[in-house]
Image: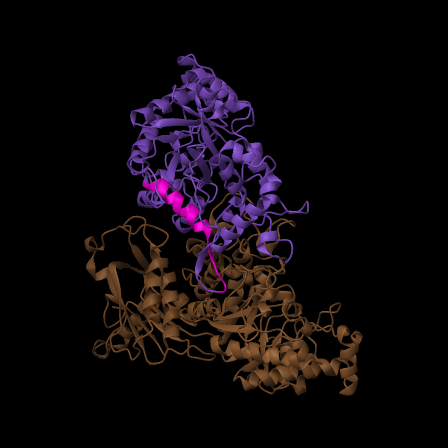
Chain colours: A purple, B brown
Amino acid sequence: MQAQTVYGALHGLQTLSQLCQFNFSSRVIEILMTPWIINDQPRFSFRGLLIDTSRHYQPLPIIKNVIDSMAYAKLNVLHWHIVDTQSFPLEIPSYPKLWDGAYSTSERYTMADAAEIVSYAQKRGINVLAELDVPGHALSWGKGYPSLWPSKDCQEPLDVSNEFTFKVIDGILSDFSKVFKYKFVHLGGDEVNTSCWTLTPHVSKWLKEHSMNESQAYQYFVLQAQKIALLHGYEIVNWEETFNNFGNKLSPKTVVHNWLGGGVAQRVVAAGLRCIVSNQDKWYLDHLDTTWEQFYMNEPLTNITKSEQQKLVIGGEVCMWGETVDASDIQQTIWPRAAAAAERLWTPYDKLAKEAKQVTGRLAHFRCLLNQRGIAAAPLAADTPLTQPGRSAPLEPGSCYLQ
Amino acid sequence: MWVLGVTERRVMGAFWVLNLVLFLVQVVGIKGAHGIGEHGVRIWPMPLSVSHSHKSLYVGKDFKIMSQGSKYKDASGILKDGFSRFLAVVKGAHVVDGDTSKLDQSRVLQGLNVFISSTKDELQYGIDESYKLLVPSPDKPTYAHLEAQTVYGALHGLQTLSQLCQFNFSSRVIEILMTPWIINDQPRFSFRGLLIDTSRHYQPLPIIKNVIDSMAYAKLNVLHWHIVDTQSFPLEIPSYPKLWDGAYSTSERYTMADAAEIVSYAQKRGINVLAELDVPGHALSWGKGYPSLWPSKDCQEPLDVSNEFTFKVIDGILSDFSKVFKYKFVHLGGDEVNTSCWTLTPHVSKWLKEHSMNESQAYQYFVLQAQKIALLHGYEIVNWEETFNNFGNKLSPKTVVHNWLGGGVAQRVVAAGLRCIVSNQDKWYLDHLDTTWEQFYMNEPLTNITKSEQQKLVIGGEVCMWGETVDASDIQQTIWPRAAAAAERLWTPYDKLAKEAKQVTGRLAHFRCLLNQRGIAAAPLAADTPLTQPGRSAPLEPGSCYLQ
């Protein structure tokens, strides 16, 4: 085997592991159908899985199990959506009361835990994209620092009028930079309901003083956060609303993270910005009614034909939002549908199946391989309306390969 | 000091003694002495006796195990491996990088002294699983003390100790709160089982090992392996190598070495493996490799009672079993036998006539023949309850009857002088997704059995994870936490069990979260909506593990 980097070699080992099987007669491991000549490289450089540790805390062993499984499918970015409205589980040394927003004292990650995750992932060729979603999705920050809320009765988004808000963001990103070494940091910016800014007197006053309406304040916030992140040496990823609302104001190297639907990626790259594709109608794992076939057929370069624009789509990501996902069901909700997307992101376009059903057998085989490696990947088949494809239990007795 | 020497007491007057007693009561805690009051005690299952106080200790960086004075030599490394696993689970959820040398050294535990009185490491039905755990040791305050009769009692003690440990987010070390702990513990029942079914769905080895790990956390001690059934025959049988042609596919099989691996993995964790060969029903898959075992091509169950070959095969299988499955018992099934194929198939019907048997006598004959064969291989036998219900007085007298159909059976079995394992399906079938953890908890094996000599005949109970809708993707979330509820019912003394299940909600939720922290996909306790079946609920909404 040869590779440019050790991470290429790791991918080669993965492939080699899939050529090996146990021979029940000789009781040794065999490789059938040699000689094999395999040349391989990914189509996209960014092949991600988002996990959400705010809606439910995920213990370290579970996150490690997820990372293991990502490596089996050659995914290479763990997008860690660490904090959100419901809980703030991460230690922030600069502002130690932030993790008072955790669900409980034990449902927290120390910085050493975070470093452990980064290290565990790195050994498997997986980058960790840390997300600090601002200014929305940040209610939990105020548990430890209530002045971050516009008011006690109006707790989102983060108070744009408060200098302290940006000091805290700076502190967090400074702490991040010691542990999260991926080139990018994700600053969120999605689903910002600014009404608390206009409803809260001191914030409303600040808006007037700065001649901003709500949406200009949103823009201001995002751009301020961007500036801080840039000073810490990061390149920035933002959710697509930032582009949709003020795309031409974003830092020019911003990577826009598409999630709302199709058709966005093409506009992003037409504007000269890079894009990560996660359109929710096809690549949201928490949408239990989305089938693996839909995951497989979701083409990131849809309607993007110019080669220089195609290059701006750096890749895509499937998203395992955590509202109904904890340690008990995370893996069966991620797999096998994430594997379908993993092939869409790795395999050259002309080698992808034109119809998903053509790969049913091979995906079923991969799913059984995951099971054999202790990954609780769900069956492919979901026949009845009551069984959601996203988390189906096997309907009846049968072979793994046929379910 | 939490205990006073004789000298001190002698010089005290009655007044001081009284004050002392009151002081000790406050320090040791009446609530701790009984342990029913859950306040502070989060051990699952609840030990026989627990007392604790209020002092925190830390687990030292190089916490080690010592065996001063212990008779047990640990030649096979069971204790050493158990201690490694203890350290791994205790340190698995967070990076433990605090420096214990900076702490008050009188509060840092340097190690655990383990004293085991038996030199043997044989795992078998009825061994002594008791242990006594003192944290800290009264003689050596910077050590914890564990004593047990057998290494398997010591493993249970390590489990309990692991549940006393938690990560301290300030000091970044492992701490043990509420010491001194004085725990005396032993199980109420000797047979505390979980059934898995690898015929309806193949379960890969890593998944079975994960299940075994989780059983040890709840102090279950029998893995009842329902290996083959109608749908598939996944196990290698060297005596009859075509039997596993009945597997779902060539890869969905277990070699004998795989089976031995499972037995060995379980044994190291104090878990016996009860192998089941269900005959004569539930055996359609046998005929894939040997069609003559079927009454006919068109009528494939039960196994052909008229064919001598049938009993040769059973003998071969049990012979191969005996090389790998060393538990005292073997399970011969005998449930749900629909004998119509025997009367419908001419050569079998002829045989019945020749032997003056009707269908149900033939069923009895089959079961008793199989029993004889198993006895010759040195096993004691477990059979499902239909065998008792139909011809209980004909069963081998040492047969253990496995109750599953419903309540009220155990009392009849023990009244007849036979032993019983309780698995009544209305409460202890894990594949019944509508059965709640509360129902699992409240299912009392000795219901209506009041005579002490009859109570002894109930050797224990078992929760059953039938595999029709269970594969590697959902087995653990369907087993846990409900199996834990039953595990306490089987371990904890009757008078220490909660009288209402809701009293243990917090402690069970805590245990469920502990399972999650150890990489076991235990499901949430709560299932609010009709659509969410308690047996396999996903969390309904964001929230803390401890509240779901």
Count the labels in the image. Answer: 0
The correct choice, above or below, for B99 with respect to A289 in the image is below
- Residue A189 at x, y percent in the picture: 45, 27
Q: Judge left or right: residue B430 versus residue B268.
A: right
Residue B458 image-quadrant placement: bottom right
Q: Judge left or right: residue A366 versus residue B9.
A: right
Residue B225 image-quadrant placement: bottom right
- Residue A81 seen: no
Main SS of the magenta part reads helix
- Residue A207 at x, y percent in the picture: 43, 16
Residue at left offset 62%, top offset 50%: B532
Q: Is residue A23 magenta?
A: yes
- Magenta segment: A6-25
- Residue A123 at x, y percent in the picture: 34, 45
The correct choice, above or below, for B308 with respect to B213 in the image is below
Residue at left offset 41%, top offset 26%: A159
